[in-house]
Image: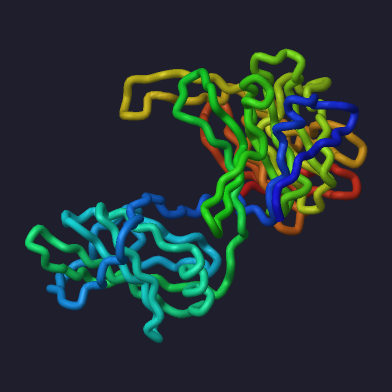
């Protein structure tokens, strides 16, 4: 399924600039966790006859050094080719991924960059679900002799993963940015495309996106205006191909919505209200830090548009953030920190989807 433009928006917002930049994430979305995909380096021979495969070699009693380190992995049967770089000195390289029945995908390289062809790779994985593959790495040294390292082992799982991953992409920054956006990546083919690019509304900021049960719709994200003051900050909810802005800064909620978690039913979401600041320090290699000075949780009911909070999830004596629902949707957990001790603990509250009310329950350490 290809992304499409969300060209129709409720109440005429968030405006043409944001509208034209908004795309629908394709098919299934892989949640939270980030599954590493291979480093793609184009190094195959592009001209001339295909090099001959090694027929004689000397064996080395160690595995090859490769980047990323894909040794001993379990891989889903629909993952894109696991491209990698052989970090061994040599003048040419050959990599062969083979199954137990002798079927193999072979790649030659001049500089150690290994790019496995998509169609043969997908056929090899599909035919070997639940079985093991071995990866032979050959390196030709300066004397023209082939060296063969200990084979790497990959086990092909029977179960597939979700086909797409959505993330925010931006370069390393301190307090400013230029290119920023929400992107989707096809984990089956390495293709990347924008969902919403900040350049489509004068370098605006996009962040804190969330989905219901890893489905592409409904989903939401948050925007902040850049150079275009006509774009109002807030939450954008996309449902049935239509996008609409939800004003969450009402009454006792002074700050914009932050980390958001959808209820599994898709009609309610809980979000954090954070007061964060950035500061720099001189300890270690990473000198940037973000400090949360105050945080609570609030809830939005998309059936009515009501935004509310509750003492069960917004205690002034605690910093409450990072909400997460149970699979059944009957419990809401979040991280809370007591002041002034600074101790962080995970807490749980019961929830009624009929009344949209929460009730504090016992802690979980």
* Residue at the limit of the structure toward the right, as seen here: 304
Q: Quadrant of residue 162?
A: bottom right
Taking 253 as reference, is 73 left or right? left
* Depth order, front residue of 250/68: 68
Q: Whole-percent x and y of residue 349?
A: 73, 46
| Rendered image coloring scheme | rainbow
Task: Examine the rendered structure and indicate whether residue 65 appears above or below residue 125.
Answer: above
Q: Is residue 320 above or below residue 224?
A: below
Q: Position of residue 96 (x, y in %)?
A: 32, 71
Looking at this rendering, what residue extends furthest in the bottom direction?
101
In the image, residue 296 above or below residue 150:
above
Residue 215 seen: yes
User: Residue at position x 47%, y 66% from top?
Assistant: 75
- Whether residue 365 is visible, yes or no, is no
Q: Is 143 displayed left or right of 236 in the figure? A: left
In the picture shown, does residue 201 fall above or below 153?
Answer: above
Q: Please report the residue visible at 20 percent of the width from the left and 56 percent of the height from the top.
A: 88
Residue at 31% x, 54% y: name it: 113
Q: Residue 50: image x %, image y %?
A: 31, 66
In the drawing, does residue 328 fall left or right of residue 52? right
Of residues 349 and 59, the one nearer the viewer is: 59
Q: Quadrant of the N terminus?
A: bottom right
Q: Residue at x 46, y 54 (%)?
A: 37
**Outermost front residue:** 48
- Based on the displayed image, in which of its 4 quarters is residue 183 positioned? top right
Residue 253 located left or right of residue 169 = right
Q: Position of residue 239 (x, y in %)?
A: 82, 44
């Amino acid at each position: 399924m290809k992304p499409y433009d969300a060209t129709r928006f409720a109440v005429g917002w968030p405006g043409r600039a944001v509208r034209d930049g908004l795309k629908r994430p394709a098919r299934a979305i892989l949640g939270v966790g980030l599954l590493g995909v291979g480093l793609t380096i184009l190094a195959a021979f592009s001209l001339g006859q295909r090099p001959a495969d090694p027929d004689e070699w000397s064996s080395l009693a160690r595995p090859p050094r490769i980047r990323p380190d894909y040794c001993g992995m379990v891989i889903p049967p629909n993952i894109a080719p696991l491209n990698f770089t052989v970090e061994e000195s040599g003048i040419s390289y050959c990599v062969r991924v083979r199954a137990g029945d002798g079927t193999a995908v072979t790649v030659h390289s001049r500089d150690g960059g290994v790019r496995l062809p998509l169609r043969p790779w997908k056929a090899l994985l599909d035919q070997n679900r639940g079985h093991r593959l071995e990866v032979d790495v050959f390196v030709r040294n300066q004397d023209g002799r082939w060296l063969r390292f200990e084979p790497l082992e990959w086990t092909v799982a029977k179960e597939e993963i979700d086909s797409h991953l959505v993330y925010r992409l931006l370069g390393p920054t301190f307090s400013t940015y230029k290119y920023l956006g929400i992107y989707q990546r096809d984990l089956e083919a390495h293709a990347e495309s924008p969902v919403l690019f900040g350049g489509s509304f004068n370098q605006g900021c996009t962040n804190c996106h969330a989905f219901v049960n890893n489905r592409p719709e409904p989903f939401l994200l948050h925007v902040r205006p850049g150079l275009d003051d006509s774009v109002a900050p807030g939450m954008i909810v996309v449902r049935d191909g239509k996008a609409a802005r939800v004003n969450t800064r009402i009454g006792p909620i002074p700050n914009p919505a932050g980390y958001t978690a959808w209820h599994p039913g898709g009609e309610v979401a809980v979000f954090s209200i954070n007061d964060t600041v950035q500061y720099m320090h001189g300890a270690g290699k990473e000198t940037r830090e973000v400090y949360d000075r105050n945080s609570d949780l609030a809830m939005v009911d998309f059936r009515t548009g009501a935004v509310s909070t509750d003492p069960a999830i917004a205690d002034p004596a605690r910093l409450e953030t990072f909400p997460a629902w149970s699979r059944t949707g009957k419990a809401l957990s979040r991280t809370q920190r007591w002041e002034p001790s600074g101790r962080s603990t995970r807490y749980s509250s019961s929830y009624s989807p009929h009344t949209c009310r929460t009730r504090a329950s016992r802690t979980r350490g």
